[in-house]
Image (cartoon, helix red, strand yellow):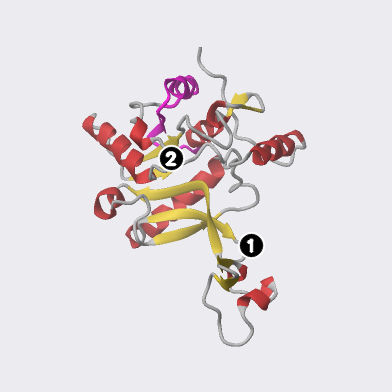
Amino acid sequence: MSSAALIPARAGSARVPGKNIRDLAGHPLLAYSIAAAQEAGIFDAVLVSTDSARIAAVAERYGADVPALRPAKMATATSPDVEWVRYTLAKLAAEGREFDAFSILRPTSPFRGPDTIRRAYDQLVALGERVDSVRAVRLCAEHPGKMWVIEGELMRPLLDQPPGVPYHSRQYASLPKVYVQDSSLEFAWTSVITTHDSIAGERVAPFRTEDLEGFSIDYPEDWQRAEELVAAGRATLPRVAAPSR
């Protein structure tokens, strides 16, 4: 089947300014997702979606395709992903480039390598039409059963509590397993864009990330930890080829 890697890299990151092209271990952050997608060997196209000509130039130097700059209205902090994905796939379809499936590979997960991508791809292929997509998840470190909503002087549990001992008074090990999505990857059939107006659809299968696969750089302290992990040899980055001039 044909598939496309879609790497979103808008310019307006507020928490870590310029992070998509900020240097990490000798290359811009964006380069590691491009390299991982290329080395995975499953994509017919590796594409970067950005609103920035500067980011587009960096992406192209590292071997990605930038079909068109994303409109500014699709590059705000609150823009839903389905907008730029639909826009990008429509641009490609107009050029005669259509795909059965797509993956979103965010640059903020530099330790997600080609093996991780292939594992998720194989899961989507094995499940076939029984699912609309697969999405990366990991066990919650902070269980929602112990979360509260404050209302005036009092608060109430976020979740409805079971009879007997409530979740918020139980040990973690006795609580039902709950997973939170991480931003490392998702795979979906392109048909979900038109049939569900969504990047995930309705039948979403879990892809369980392992170790640092789901690590994401969202805050300045995450960047510092990524540098420390690489320097200590505790994390491996995808191999990046020298950029073109």
Provide residue 192's location: percent of width, then percent of height.
Answer: 30, 52
Provide the residue designation for mark 2. 42
| Residue under the image location 59 percent in, 27 percent down | 22
**In the picture, residue 43 is in which quadrant?**
top left
The number of numbered badges drawn on the structure is 2
Q: Helix, strand or loop at disc 1?
A: loop
Q: What residue do we see at 64% from left, 84% from top?
A: 165
**Residue reaching furthest to the top:** 245
Q: Is residue 119 left or right of residue 72?
A: right
Q: Residue 53 location, x and y as percent?
A: 42, 21
**Is 51 contained in the magenta span?**
yes
Task: Report the Cα–Cα distance between label 2 and label 1.
Answer: 35 Å
Assess disc 2: are there few (<14), some (14-19) or many (≥20) residues with their C-alpha within 10 Å of its C-alpha.
some
Q: Is residue 162 magenta?
A: no
Instruction: Specify start and end residues of the magenta stretch as a single range.
Output: 40-64
- Amino acid type indicated by mark 1: Glu
Q: Quadrant of the N terminus?
A: top left
Q: Which residue is tagged 1? A: 142
Q: Is residue 138 above or below residue 167?
A: above
Q: Amino acid at mark 2?
A: Ile
220 vs 193: above or below: above
The answer to whether residue 120 of the structure is visible from this angle is: yes
Residue 2 seen in the current view: no
The quadrant where residue 5 appears: top left
Q: Nearer the viewer, mark 2 or mark 1?
A: 1
Q: Nearer the viewer, residue 83 or 7?
A: 83
